[in-house]
Image (cartoon, helix red, strand yellow):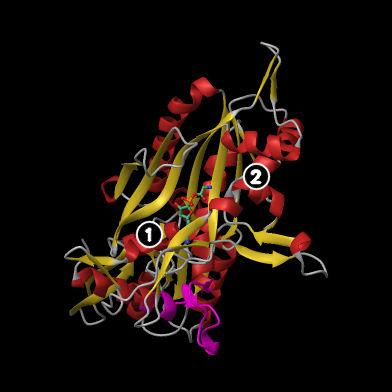
């Protein structure tokens, strides 16, 4: 259950996201487009760090996974075969009093009577199925034959390219095909900031296997995915694994887990890990008339592989990282008086900017030149930010608020003016503990690289 304090926390998070350039309402100057968001200068870095880390551990650090990047516009027949044209819909209700539209499961019920969650009205239409796919036309003719869809999940292009990917990669079962990319759903009620959007990104892996390996691999991937979240700074105790019941599960799935996170607005899904059996490949083989079988050279058998699918949302994970990182604590100001500090405690691996670099004074040539040398040293290896304006304490606060894990200050000791032994050393300040250590510039790159890897 979320409390008024949680709602207030969420409001502060949304406001910080806009103020510091993480996330903006899309088309804001025209009044905004509901359910669509733009990532600003810092949001795009955070998102990229997340996607790059997922790609690294899912594709680059494994021998059994290859990547792909499929088209967004999708052939109608693909989505007919997958069942999306017929069945990818939510039951929708209109409130005749306030004219709002809702998913059936969002209605509130009082004394057995369904009511509008917006105005409490009881004059509601019957539920009708609303297909969530965005339809468009490819080419000049806008008729039945030119209908295509913006993909509602990245998975289908992986299934459709299964044979090509298998042949070029020469992988043996079990092996996976990974993809990160946009997906589109015309959600009836986009809500909770970016949590339920109409355009979002997914990080999906289709891990193909023999039928007898399916259930074991479902467990394996659930554990791998939990480890992933811990490695990006989401603690295990904030994650929950929900076993999706037989009634809720897709009819072709033999087992599905939802990995959920404690958002300020409640415990909600971050990712689904599903054992989809051989349903998708079988459907595409049937509809296309092309063989999608795997040939086992040892047993000389041909069969359609089964698949286990961990499917994560990029935007939901970015939102979880921001919610998890957001903190208010106490820190001394310039005069040593305690004040409230706003800080995003991102894991250094995810932080948009890795290191802030400051000359103690902006009008001292020696300090500025040395600080710029440090920038040149680190910049090829990580995203750094040079800042010379304002008191040092203010500069630290600005970096704390955007989650920069380290700051380096170049002072008179760096120039050897106080103690020759301290020449070419700087202070390295850590965001969470606010501890400062003196470190040689020549050791800086190695010290930071291990901490942000
Ligand atoms: N291929 C399987 C699939 O698409 P899904 O549970 O519908 O399964 C997977 O979606 C993930 O995509 C979700 O766990 C969520 O993280 C993300 N996702 C789905 N719909 C979303 C939406 N409207 N806005 C943001 N993320 C969404």
Percent coordinates x, y for residue 384 in the rendering: 52, 66
In this picture, residue 326 sits left or right of residue 43: left
| Residue tagged 1 | 320
Sequence-wise, the earlier of marks 1 and 2 is 2
> Mark 2 and mark 1 in contact (Cβ < 8 Å)?
no
Looking at the image, the residue that sits furthest to the right is 140
Percent coordinates x, y for residue 36 in the rendering: 52, 72
Range of magenta residues: 15-40
Give the number of the disc on residue 209. Answer: none
Observer able to see residue 93: yes
Looking at the image, the residue that sits furthest to the top is 299
* Quadrant (top left, top right, bottom left, bottom right) of the N terminus: bottom left
Observer able to see residue 232: no
Compared to residue 337, the image places residue 423 above or below, namely: above
Q: Mark 2 falls on what kind of element? A: helix
> What distance separates the C-alpha of mark 1 from that of mark 2?
34 Å
Q: Mark 1 falls on what kind of element? A: helix
Decide which of 264, 151 is in the foreground and name it: 151
Decide which of 396, 149 is in the foreground and name it: 149
In this picture, residue 267 sits left or right of residue 170: left
In this picture, residue 110 sits left or right of residue 84: left
Q: Quadrant of residue 122?
A: bottom left
| Residue tagged 2 | 81
Question: Residue at position x 38%, y 59% from top?
Answer: 320
Magenta segment: does it hold 25? yes
Assess disc 1: are there few (<14), some (14-19) or many (≥20) residues with their C-alpha within 10 Å of its C-alpha: many
């Amino acid at each position: 259950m979320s409390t008024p304090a949680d709602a207030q926390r969420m409001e502060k998070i949304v406001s910080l996201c806009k103020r510091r350039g993480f996330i903006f309402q899309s088309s804001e100057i025209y009044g905004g487009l509901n359910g669509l968001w733009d990532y600003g200068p810092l949001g795009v870095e955070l998102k990229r760090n997340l996607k790059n880390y997922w790609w690294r551990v899912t594709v680059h650090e494994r021998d059994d996974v290859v990547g792909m990047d499929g088209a967004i516009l999708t052939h109608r027949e693909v989505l007919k075969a997958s069942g999306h044209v017929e069945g990818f819909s939510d039951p929708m209700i209109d409130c005749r009093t306030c004219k709002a539209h809702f998913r059936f499961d969002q209605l509130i019920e009082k004394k057995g009577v369904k009511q509008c969650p917006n105005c409490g009205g009881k004059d509601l239409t019957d539920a009708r199925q609303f297909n969530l796919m965005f339809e468009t036309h490819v080419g000049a003719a806008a008729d039945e034959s030119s209908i295509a869809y913006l993909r509602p999940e990245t998975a289908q292009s992986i299934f459709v390219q299964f044979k090509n990917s298998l042949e070029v990669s020469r992988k043996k079962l079990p092996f996976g095909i990974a993809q990160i990319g946009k997906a589109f759903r015309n959600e009836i009620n986009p809500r909770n900031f970016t949590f339920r959007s109409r355009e979002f990104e997914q990080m999906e892996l289709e891990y193909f296997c023999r039928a007898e390996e399916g259930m074991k691999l479902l467990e394996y991937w659930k554990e791998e995915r939990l480890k992933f979240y811990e490695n990006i700074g989401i603690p295990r105790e904030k994650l929950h694994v929900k076993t999706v019941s037989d009634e809720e599960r897709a009819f072709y799935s033999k087992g599905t887990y939802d990995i959920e996170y404690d958002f300020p607005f409640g415990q909600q899904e971050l990712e689904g890990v599903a054992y989809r059996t051989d349903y998708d490949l079988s459907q595409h083989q049937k509809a296309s008339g092309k063989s999608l079988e795997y040939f086992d050279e040892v047993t000389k058998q041909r069969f359609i592989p089964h698949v286990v699918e961990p499917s994560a949302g990029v935007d939901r994970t970015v939102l979880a990282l921001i919610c998890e990182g957001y903190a208010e604590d106490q820190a001394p100001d310039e005069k040593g008086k305690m004040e409230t500090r706003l800080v995003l405690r991102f894991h250094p691996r995810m932080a948009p900017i890795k290191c802030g670099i400051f000359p103690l004074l902006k009008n001292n040539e020696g300090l500025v030149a040395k600080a710029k040398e440090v920038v040149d040293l680190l910049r090829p290896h990580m995203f750094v930010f040079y800042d010379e304006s304002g008191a040092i304490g203010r500069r630290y606060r600005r970096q704390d608020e955007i989650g920069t894990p380290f700051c380096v200050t170049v002072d008179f000791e760096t120039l050897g003016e106080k103690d020759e032994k301290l020449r070419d050393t700087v202070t390295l300040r850590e965001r969470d503990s606010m501890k400062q250590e003196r470190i040689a510039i020549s050791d800086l790159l190695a010290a930071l690289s291990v901490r942000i890897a």
